[in-house]
Image: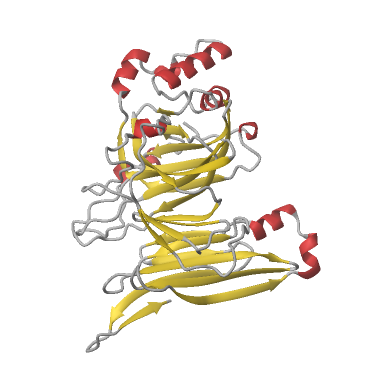
Amino acid sequence: MRLRATSSERLGTANRDMHWLEPVQYLDDNGTHAASVLDIDAGLLYIRLHTEYRTTRPNEPLGGLLKVYRKNLRFAANGDETAWELLFVERLPGPVRRAHLDRTRLRNEDGTYAPRNLAVLYYMPRNETIAYRVRVYELEALQPATGFEAAVASAGAPWWKRAAGLGAAEAAVHAQHLANRDHLCPDDADDDVADSVYAGHRFRHCVGSAGLTMRTTDFALAGALEVLEFSLRGRTLLYSRLNDVVRFRMLELPAALNGSLVSSDAGISSDMARDGLQGSAYTQPDMVQTRGPGVTELLRDIGSQSFLAQLQSTRPGGGVDVFQAHGGTTGDTFFFSFSLLQNTTLARKWVHEDIKRYRLPVHQQFSGLSRDELRLVNDAPLVDQAGLTSVFYFKATDIIVAVDTQWFRDHGSADVTQLQR
């Protein structure tokens, strides 16, 4: 299957497409190869997220839409570079505000590696307020979809080709019926049919011919203030809010003994979360919250020109390192800064350090910038994290900032020193 672009008519006016390309899995660290060696036989994942997708639901005119594809990495040998396979499609119950992929894969004390998780922050307008939710996709947990074999037996295989002999209207009805009743995806290469299915008022999720999906967990964020910045590292969610009294908040997500995330004391299944059963059936677990330092003035929305991320702290005894990047325009000047906030224990005060501050005068040239040039100025910074290294890049500049944080103990001394590069 060749990947196709979604029709712009199906997307909201503020839609932003997000993309991730990840190995399905890495080889086990058995001492014969590095921990970062990917498993060629497992293949490659391509994740595409539309932050605003138009729907026909009366109370949900816009929702996020996430598609996950897989490709065999041996395509170079057989010459088939278009062999993308649709694994599953999900529509989130509201527009997506932010998303962050934690791909750091830090090594745990027992020799295992932290799993990769994709956290998607979406919001649901309810009367005169807004509820914020986070859905976490566990990339390491591709698993068979519940009821897939029974659905295929009922629909007949290959179900996505059975509508080939039908007219356009009949094919669309047939595909919608299978997606809504059996959660079987239509042929994603068929633009009109697939998009009409994904926009349907009863559609929530569907799976492709492999019958695989990802384990997901949903969490609720207390409060209705707009979320400005958002990231995930391990089991820690880090976010800031408009007009909050603290710079950021941290939530420790609850997990089972095997390390998998849980969203209620009794556990809520992925299918229940996907089907929107979060009313009386959903119990929000207790989550440990840590407040960041207070602010002297209320946080203001500066668009998407900011980022908030937790750095890995290897300081003996534990600690929290938080990295902030802010950018924006004031008058005829574009400015951006990087800050590091540290807390050696959760009970002590935060220590703030400005790493860099930049000012780029634009003067009268700012009013003459084209739309594409203005987009470069106002776009969010490009950010990536791997291991102990975090990299930040503002598109309007030629400056890339890399932060590599490592704590070490001096020989013959009880003091510890932090190395920043």
Residue 15 placement (x, y as % from top left): 60, 42
Residue 348, horizontal then vertical, whole percent: 37, 73
Would residue 281 be visible to someone looking at this image? yes
Note whether residue 79 is visible.
Answer: no
Q: How is the image coloured?
A: secondary structure
Residue 275 location (% of width, % of height)? 41, 29
Residue 332 vertical position relative to residue 10 in the rendered view, above or below: below
Of 88 and 29, the residue lying toward us: 88
Return the residue nearer the eye: 76 or 229: 229
Say above or below: 18 vs 385. Answer: above
Judge from the rendering whether residue 57 lies leftward or rightward of residue 263; answer left or right.
right
Quadrant location, the C terminus: bottom left
Q: Is residue 255 above or below residue 277?
A: below
Count all numbered tags in the image, as a single digit: 0
Q: Is residue 128 left or right of residue 344?
A: right
Residue 232, image x, y percentages:
41, 54
Q: Quadrant of residue 51?
A: top right
Q: Give the left or right position of residue 15, taking residue 367 as reference.
A: left
Q: Residue at x 27, y 58 (%)?
A: 35
In the image shown, does 25 or 246 lie closer to the viewer? Answer: 246
Q: Residue at x 57, y 14 (%)?
A: 168
The vertical placement of 307 against 25, above or below, is: below
